[in-house]
Image (tube, rainbow, N blue to C red):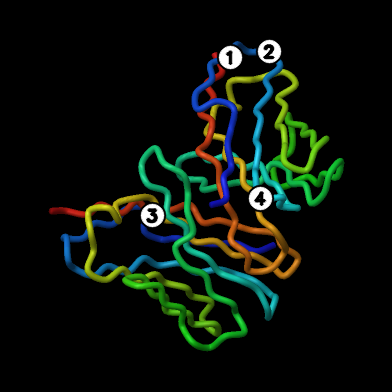
Amino acid sequence: AQTVTQSQPEMSVQEAETVTLSCTYDTSESDYYLFWYKQPPSRQMILVIRQEAYKQQNATENRFSVNFQKAAKSFSLKISDSQLGDAAMYFCAYRSRAGKSTFGDGTTLTVKP
Amino acid sequence: DVKVTQSSRYLVKRTGEKVFLECVQDMDHENMFWYRQDPGLGLRLIYFSYDVKMKEKGDIPEGYSVSREKKERFSLILESASTNQTSMYLCASREGQGPETQYFGPGTRLLVL
């Protein structure tokens, strides 16, 4: 069974600074998908960024980028130029080719003004 | 925009009551999911459905059942609510089994007394 580990229960960052959230996973599959989701306080969870394992190039979405290290089974999220609206709980998720998702425990990100 | 709605944001029930949580999506998605979210445990899959009248057990199905009579609606049923089912319940939907975005509802916070 796949497992997803987010080793940082809480992180904080100064507004306009950069922060990196860690995620590691365990799988025996060679093809899969990885995601970062954001859950703002009392609001719906939304997709931040996704990565397909067969793609070597790291995904980027505006201020959000990932560092995907397939051999190390690592999938970290970098948030550049942090904004107050980035404050949320962030979940790393693994999805197998069969479509089953496994989520990490989440990292609560605080942005300090 | 895809919309996933849940019938209640907050619910208070008594031990032993039968509880229905309703979820509706408006994008004709094949797949629908029920998760529970608990602090420090991330999201855990209760049940999912990949078609009308089809259902599959997730990782923690005990004490729950589901119903999908129409494509847009996926119901979670607690046959006899217990205090250990106090949690946040999230519904989600997505189109396929690949890297498609999974859309989440706003969640139902259930308190069982």
Above or below A38: residue B53: above
Q: Is residue B88 left or right of residue A81?
A: right
Where disc 1 sits, the SS reads: strand
Q: Earlier in the sequence, mark 1 or mark 4?
A: 1
Estimate the spatial distance between the alpha carbons at disc 2 and disc 4, rounded to whole Å: 32 Å
Residue at 69%, 58% (x, y): give it.
B95
| Quarter location, residue B54 | top right
A14 left or right of B39?
A: left
Which quadrant of the view contains residue A52? bottom right
Same subunit: marks 1 and 4: yes
- Residues marked 2 and 4 touching at CB (< 8 Å): no
**Could you tell me which residue is drawn at 41 percent across and 55 percent down?**
A90
Q: Secondary structure at mark 3?
A: strand
Q: Does the CB distance between marks 1 and 2 fall below 8 Å?
A: yes
Front position among marks 2 and 4: 4
Tell me the chain of label 2: B
Name the residue carrying label 1.
B13
Say whether marks 3 and 4 touch (CB < 8 Å): no
Question: Which amino acid does the dot numbered 1 rest on?
Answer: Lys
Q: Chain of mark 3?
A: A
Mark 2 / mark 4, whichever is N-terminal: 2
